[in-house]
Image (cartoon, rainbow, N blue to C red):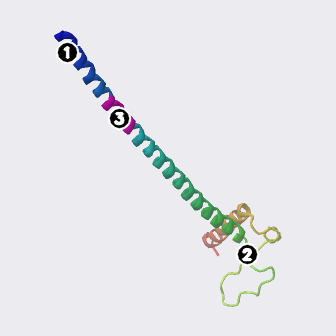
Amino acid sequence: MKLLQQIDEMRGKLNDISGDEKTLIKALGDALNRLDQQLLLDVRNLATDHEVRREAILAELQSLAASIGMFRPPLEGPAATDGAPSYVSSQAHQSIAPGDWRQAASNIEDELEQRLNGRNSPH
């Protein structure tokens, strides 16, 4: 009879331990769910912040692209009278549409090359 009593006590202890472990597992699951939700919220906030920054950068780039070509020399500008070298533009440069940054970059390189070659050549 003593053995059956000990088995019943062990069964009761195991049931208690099992119940405690179920409670702990449920608490762990709840904590993990809360962390998952917080992580999801953080990711969404980061994505939103990134999108805002991306839109601001895109707006700056569009503004820059729109302004390329706005500082071209006038088609018929006054002659330089102060002895400074005047900019001579070819007809090809005048037909460039504003916003053509590749052509503008090429024009800068050409002008720099012309000015540097003009300085280095003996007069």
Could you tell me residue 111's position as x and y percent? 68, 69
Vertical placement of 4 versus 44: above or below? above
Extreme residue toward the bottom, this view: 81
Mark 1, residue position: 6
* Callout 1 amino acid: Gln
- Sooner in the amino-acid sequence: mark 3 or mark 1: 1
Give the distance between the C-alpha atoms of the residues marked 2 and 3, in whole angstroms: 76 Å
Vertical placement of 3 versus 30: above or below? above
CB atoms at circles 2 and 1 under 8 Å apart? no
Q: Which residues are magenta?
A: 19-27
Could you tell me residue 117's position as x and y percent? 64, 68
Q: Measuring 46% from the left and 49% from the top, which residue is drawn there?
A: 38
**Closer to the observer: label 2 or label 3?**
3
- Sooner in the amino-acid sequence: mark 2 or mark 1: 1
Mark 2, residue position: 72
- Which secondary structure, mark 3? helix
* Callout 2 amino acid: Arg
Q: Give residue 23's mark.
A: 3
CB atoms at circles 2 and 3 under 8 Å apart? no
